[in-house]
């Protein structure tokens, strides 16, 4: 096998992966996940790139202990982060599918 042809093929694959990853990152910026805590009393909307877009606190909580509200906000944000991370893994795995990257190495691109 011609080593130069093999190198050209590897460069073409690398370029394709870079384009796919860049496209996936743009896609993640436009996708949203929704986290919540306290049976929906606190809700967070976050993009797949971990940018919080909205935070909603049910007015009934305003008379409660501030520490409880803080805990619920933290729990809702953490729920949204977990969902954004799962979305990230899914989208990035799709960006490297079909170009021969071993499954364990797909996480290196994103």
Image (cartoon, helix red, strand yellow):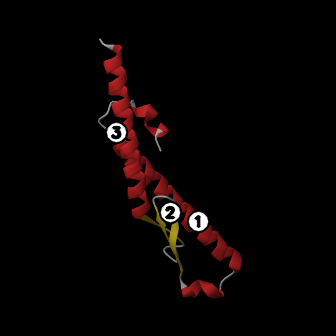
State which quadrant residue 98 falls in.
top left
**Is residue 68 depicted above or below 105 in this figure?**
below
- Residue at the extreme top: 1
**Is residue 110 depicted above or below 32 in this figure?**
above
Which residue is at the front of the view, 51 or 8?
A: 8
Residue 31 showing in the rendered view: no
Q: According to the image, label 2 marks what residue?
A: 80
Judging from the image, what secondary structure is the residue with disc 2 in?
helix
Residue that appears at 54% across and 73% down: 38
Residue 23 showing in the rendered view: yes
Q: Nearer the viewer, mark 1 or mark 3?
A: 3
Q: According to the image, label 1 marks what residue?
A: 75
The answer to whether residue 103 is left or right of residue 51 is left
Residue that appears at 34% across and 32% down: 12
Task: Name the spot of residue 87 as percent of width and height, x first.
Answer: 42, 54
The first of marks 1 and 3 along the sequence is: 3
């Amino acid at each position: 096998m011609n080593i130069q042809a093999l190198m050209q093929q590897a460069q073409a694959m690398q370029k394709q992966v870079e384009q796919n990853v860049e496209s996936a990152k743009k896609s993640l910026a436009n996708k949203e996940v929704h986290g919540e805590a306290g049976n929906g009393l606190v809700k967070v909307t976050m993009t797949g790139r971990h940018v919080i877009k909205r935070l909603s606190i049910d007015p009934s909580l305003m008379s409660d202990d501030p520490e409880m509200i803080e805990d619920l906000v933290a729990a809702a944000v953490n729920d949204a982060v977990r969902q954004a991370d799962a979305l990230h893994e899914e989208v990035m795995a799709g960006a490297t599918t079909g170009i021969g990257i071993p499954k364990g190495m797909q996480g290196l691109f994103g």
